[in-house]
Image (tube, helix red, strand yellow):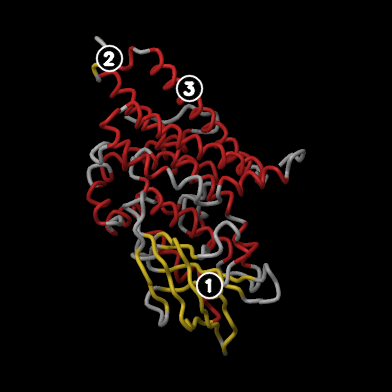
Amino acid sequence: MPTVPHVAQLDDDLAALHQQTLDFVAKEVVPHGDQWELDGHVPRDVLRTMGGLGMFGIRVPESLGGLGLGPLASATFSEALGSSTYAGFDVTVLVHTDMALPHLLNSGSEEQLARYLPEVLSGERILSIGVTEPDAGSDVAGIRTRAEKDGDGWRINGSKLFITNAVHGDMTIVAARTKPDDRYGISMFLVEKGTEGFTVAKALDKTGWRSSDTAELHFDDVWVSDDQLLGTVHRGFYETMRNFQNERLVLVGMGLGAAQRAIDITVDYTKERAAFGGHLFDLGAIRQRLGMLQAQVDAARASMYHCAWLAEQGIEPVRETSGLKAWACEMINNVMYDCVQFHGGMGYMRETTVERMSRDARILPIGGGATEVMLEEVAKRLGASS
């Protein structure tokens, strides 16, 4: 069974959070994950249960009803979620808690927080973040969806693509261009499900993350009032950038949790699989490759918690987190590749856990900032302290 990792940054509270999450995943997720993969989403009652346990308020200030923890807690939580082996479940939760909710917390007015936060924390209102478009993924400044002032509100037109939680969720935080002559003149809006002109154009069929819902969204003259503007007008690009390092951190965290489980599963399998008069694990080539995979996961885990620790000190670790995202997500895919390989023919069967995990892992070097973009972020900062 998964255990709490041995890293210097985990105090008793964080270790307890990790263990609580591991226990929840083992009891409430693993027994039902196969059905969620078929259904294409995580049931709302499961998300409500998580909300009731306080899992959606880990980063929310205590004054607003949360636990008031920081980036180390996000790393801890995401890694523990990754032990589920169902990355679609993991990302459903993390989009809500660590990719969308921070925008509401960072930029929301007192009135917006009072109106939405209680239901967000309880799991009654599930969030998605609508930034990516057909022609704008990692290049946020390239978005074409526009919002134009209209009376005491705004009228939004455009589309979004690859938006997690948007099919079954309740509110999307939408980035739209509000200053056409400024590449960075973007604003953020709170758009509730059911708003006239706001539609799910298509539920998308993905290779992996099958238990998460992902949508293409259309905005056809969608009108929202001024009190649905999130943060400062024309400053949405910078407000979006503010959370990117945390988004990348938790994607690495869930991937590392999965990679560790894949190694553990594969070690158990190779110790039982008869081969050449013994077992696969008896072969030095197998043992040593598994040993190297474990060493790489351990190194990436240490780097992840270091990045989280830097963020807790008020340092924005753009270079470190970008480098971690680039290397770790490629490495995680290598782990999955070898784990499938060591399962032999069974590794190619849909009934085998590592087969699903290998499909789930493939998106990690793409989502949240492609590897190539991450390496550019590192290169731009060569010679700098961060």
Q: Amino acid at mark 3?
A: Met
Check the picture and name the quadrant holding the N terminus. Answer: top left
User: Can you identify the residue that label 2 sits on?
Assistant: 279
User: Can you identify the residue that label 1 sits on?
Assistant: 189
Residue drawn at (43%, 70%) of the image = 217
Disc 3, SS: helix
The foreground one among 336 and 151 is: 336
Q: In the image, is residue 386 above or below residue 59?
A: above
Give x and y (percent) for residue 376: 66, 47
Check the picture and name the quadrant holding the C terminus. Answer: top right
Give x and y (percent) for residue 56: 42, 53
Q: Find the distance from the CA under tag 3 to the CA under tag 2.
A: 19 Å
User: Is residue 195 at least partly visible in the picture?
Assistant: yes
Left or right of 58, for residue 42: left
Left or right of 161, for residue 345: left
Where residue 304 sits, quadrant-wise, is top right
Disc 2, SS: strand
Q: Find the distance from the CA under tag 1 to the CA under tag 2.
A: 58 Å
Q: Amino acid at mark 1?
A: Phe
Q: In the image, is residue 291 above or below residue 222?
A: above
Residue drawn at (70%, 76%) of the image = 181
Left or right of 228, for residue 361: left
